[in-house]
Amino acid sequence: MRKIVIRAGGVAIRARLLDTPTAERIWAALPIESAARTWGEEIYFDAPVSSAAEPDARVLVKAGDIVFWPDGDAISIGFGPTPLSKTRGEIRLAGPCNVWAQALDDVRQLKSVHPGVAISVSEADA
């Protein structure tokens, strides 16, 4: 099982990759360095990959889903409501996203990350 670690500020989130075309593209691009942006209770950041929406791309996700936003070439991690959420606790993204990894740690830790903070994605130690 392939694993990554996403680091931002003092936060580190481990995740396992799923078997998807987007996961393959992101794995091949590691390590990724960027700057965090926020949108409600979502962190997103530019990634040096492109990937079309996959057949199971979705707008509604669960906390722990690590997604790729094809319209923005960005990795996104929702951990609570966004400006588009319609109900309390709903994580509604800006557009259909490809779920490519599942967090192994609590993504709500990302609440402490502010826009502009350096963020990285790298292969996790075994």
Image (cartoon, helix red, strand yellow):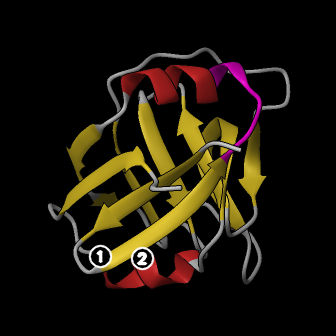
Q: Is residue 28 left or right of residue 121?
A: right
**Where in the figure is residue 49, as x and y percent of width and height?**
41, 20
Residue highlighted by disc 1: 113
Instruction: Determine whether label 2 and label 1 are within 8 Å by CB.
Output: yes
Whether residue 71 appears in magenta in the rendering, the answer is no
Crowding at mark 2 (Cα within 10 Å: few <14, some 14-19, many 20+): many
Q: Is residue 81 above or below residue 98?
A: below
Nearer the observer, 70 or 17: 17
**Where in the figure is residue 100, as x and y percent of width and height?**
66, 39
Residue lying furthest right in this view?
Answer: 56
Q: Secondary structure at mark 1?
A: loop
Residue highlighted by disc 2: 110
Name the residue at 17% across, 65% down: 117
Q: Is residue 70 above or below residue 60?
A: above
Name the residue at 50% across, 29% down: 27
**Where in the figure is residue 93, as x and y percent of width and height?**
61, 51
Numbered circle sitting on residue 29? none
Q: Is residue 3 above or below residue 50?
A: below
**Where in the figure is residue 45, as x and y percent of width and height?**
33, 46
Name the residue at 42% across, 36% down: 74
The region drawn magenta spans 17-22
- Quarter of the image holding residue 24? top right
Name the residue at 53% across, 82% down: 108
Residue lying furthest front in this view?
Answer: 126
Q: Secondary structure at mark 2?
A: helix
Residue 83 at least partly seen: no
Crowding at mark 1 (Cα within 10 Å: few <14, some 14-19, many 20+): some
Type of residue at label 2?
Answer: Leu
Nearer the observer, 122 or 38: 122
- Quarter of the image holding residue 19? top right
Type of residue at label 1?
Answer: Val
Q: CA distance from mark 2 to mark 1?
A: 5 Å
